[in-house]
Each structure stands twice: as structure tokens, then as C-alpha cells.
Image (spheres, rainbow, N blue to C red):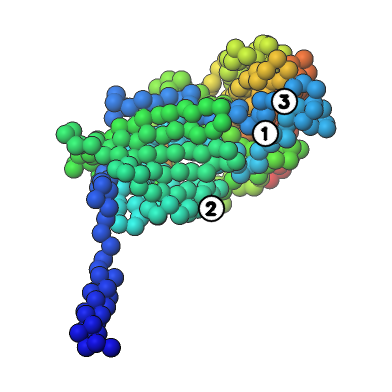
Amino acid sequence: MNPKRAAIIAVLACLVCAISSWPSAAPADQPNLAGRWTLNPSLSKMSEDVGFGMDMVNPNSNATGRDDPTGNPAMAAFRESEDDAARRDHLVNEVRRPPDELAITQTIDTIVIASGRGKPRTFNLDGREVAQTLGVVTVQASGRWNGPRLEVRYKVEQNRELRYEYSRSTNPDRLTVEIRFIERNGHDAVTLVYEPTRDDVPALPKAPAAAPRPPAAAGAPAGSAPNLGGLGQPPPLSRLGAPPQAPAPPVSLPQAAVATGPDAALAGLRQFGIVVEELRPQAAACGLTQAPLEAIVTKAFTDAGFKLLKDSDEETYVYVDIGTTNVNAGLCVSRYDVYLFTNTVATLSYQSRPALVQVQLLHEGGLAGGAPVPHGESVRANVKRAVDAFVSRIRTATERESKK
């Protein structure tokens, strides 16, 4: 080989080795999102009505049951697993009630977003999916740069995706988060605007560990899913009026003084309020009206010897919410949810003063679909099954406690 050519090749080889060892540089258009941010509601566009719709129903279905040999049109098209429902509801709740603060740390390859609600979420910036923990379930999520925007995608369930886009502006300095619900028949959107957190505001507290999933009620249908938000929403604590005067912080009690065992929190219940949420306009066309639903709840509890207060969200109350859509002239679909809530004053692990807390004691919910005429009866039967299960569990817990 020509000595001169050999020398040139050697120099080029050295350059290649040197360049390959240089650290990777951040893309020129990659903004710096790092910092602590506080939500500005007045600049944001938020709504508690956003969410995924009923697009899981096959729009080509009709009331003949052609798509389902059991006679329920398109029921197979919107069956949903318990994990899918929990994942959907958790993510929808996060959008409906966004965090007041965000803390973001950023490197060339990853970004970490913390909100004080659960474990901080770390996203790779090369588009690779990573499992993120949502309470008792996980969701596959990915992150990547889309020009000057950070795009984060959550795979909610089949044909459904929640897409976040984070961008930063200057003069004034703001972090904008645009959220879109991606599905076949709708694209709800929310815009959140965050501003830099003042230096005198304490750092976000460490989030408490997630509570374990409660056991399903006896006799609950297979695949029934807890609704952590979904179409039905419990009434906000603001409806309960001013919280009672906070007592002195509770003292530590020996373990033996804490009620334990299945449904221990239900023992001793005697009186409840009843709140049946106002039905959607489509409900009447699908055979659903308010009075029969209230009668079902009232009869189930009064027959068992309990006292009920109608239209009352006192300390403990039954809450019924039904979201109905009339897909076409031959098919109605409803999401039904029945809750038992109580309210108490407690000192949370990450706070120093007692706060009014809403506690979900029981929940039954699911989907029902069919032709308009039998649809109302089907939903009422499901609500009755739920309140009957509530009554049974309360009585069993009370009897068990009385024998101790």
C-alpha cells in the first residue's frame, strides 16, 4: 500500500474513534422543561366532563343482535376488563382533576415528571414504551420529542390513547400541557397552563403508597370493574358544606384497637343519605327515569331495617350515577355506578393538620346495552343487584362485629 495513503487512512480512523467517543448532544430544538411548576386555573381550559365516550360500541350494530349470538347487539364490542376500566378511570381522573404542581427533571435521554400523586414517572425520550404504575394497575407509556414539544402517550386500552404534549414558552415563562383523548368517535381536549413555582413554596411531598384493591363484592359479575372516575362522578366535597371543627390530631393507638377483618368499616352503619344523580337527556329514550331508581335503592335498604334520607349527602350516603347514550334508534348503552361513601376528618400522612376526607366504602358498576325497550329494565336490575350486595355486606359486617 502506498505509505501516504496508509497514513491518511490511519488519521481518518483516529478521527472516527474520537468522534464516536464524544458525548451525545441534545437536539437543537429540545427545550428545557425542568423546574417546579404551579397550575394557573385562570389560564387553563379544564372540564370535569371530558373523557372517553362510548366509541367502543360498533356503530354498524342494530337491535337484531346480529353481532352477538346472545341477542345483545355489539356487546362483544365494548366488553372491558377490570384492569382496563381501572386504567381508564385513573387516567381520566388525572385529566379532570389535574395536579396543582409539577416537578420536572430532564436529561438528554430521559425526563421525570412528579406531581406528588404517586410515584414519579420516568419516560425514555426515544419513543420506547415503559410500564408506569397507576395505583393497582400499570399502563404502557412512551415519550419522544416532536420538534419543540415533548409528546407522552398512554395506551389506555384497545383503540384508546391519552396524549400529552408539553411545551415551554418565554416572556412570560410558562409550561403548557395539551391533553387529547384519542379514540374513533371523539377527541376531547384540555389545556393546562403552569407557571414557575415561587421559591418560598415547599417541595412536593412524597406520595403515600397506593392502597390495595378492595375485594369484589359477593355475587359481583365476573369482569365488573371499579369506576374511579369514568362516566359517573361522586359529588364533590364542596357539596358537603364547611367541614366540622377539626379535632385534636389523633394519638397513636395500639394495633388491637383498630377494627380489622373483612368489611370492618361497614359494621354499625344504620342510616344513609341517598343521591341519585340527574339522568342524561338520552336516558328517557332508553327506558330510564329517576323515580324508579330511587325507589329501588330506598326499598332495598328500608326492607333491611336501615333509615334513608332522600337527596342527602350526609356523613354516609349511597350515590347512584348512570350515563346513557343512544347510539342509534336500535341500541342503548349505559354505564351504571353505585357507591357507598362516607366522610371523616383525618390527618393524612403528608399533612400536619386534619382535613375533611371522602372515603369510598363500596362500589359496584358496569356496562349494559341493548334495545331501548328492555334496556331500562336491565339497568334497574343491575342497580338492584348492587344495592342488595351492599345491604348484605353491611349486615354481615355488623353481625360479625357484634359476636366479638
Tag 2 residue: 255
Query: Which comes sooner in the sequence, label 3 or label 2?
Result: 3
Query: Which comes sooner in the sequence, label 2 or label 1?
Result: 1
Q: Position of residue 109 (x, y in %)?
A: 34, 57
Residue occupying image coordinates x 73% and y 17%: 330
Query: Which comes sooner in the sequence, label 3 or label 1?
Result: 3
Q: Position of residue 4 (x, y in %)?
A: 20, 84
Q: Which of the numbered marks, if any, corresponds to residue 78?
A: 1
User: Total number of numbered labels?
Assistant: 3
Q: Is residue 387 above or below residue 286?
A: below
- The crowding category of the residue bearing disc 1, from other C-alpha atoms within 10 Å (few below 14, some 14 to 19, many at least 20), is some
Q: Is residue 321 above or below residue 30?
A: above
Q: Amino acid at mark 3?
A: Ser
Is residue 199 toward the left or the right of residue 175 in the image? left
Q: Secondary structure at mark 1?
A: helix
Residue occupying image coordinates x 29% and y 56%: 107
Distance of mark 3 from mark 1, alpha carbons?
12 Å
Q: Quadrant of residue 387?
A: top right
In which quadrant will I find the C terminus?
Answer: top right
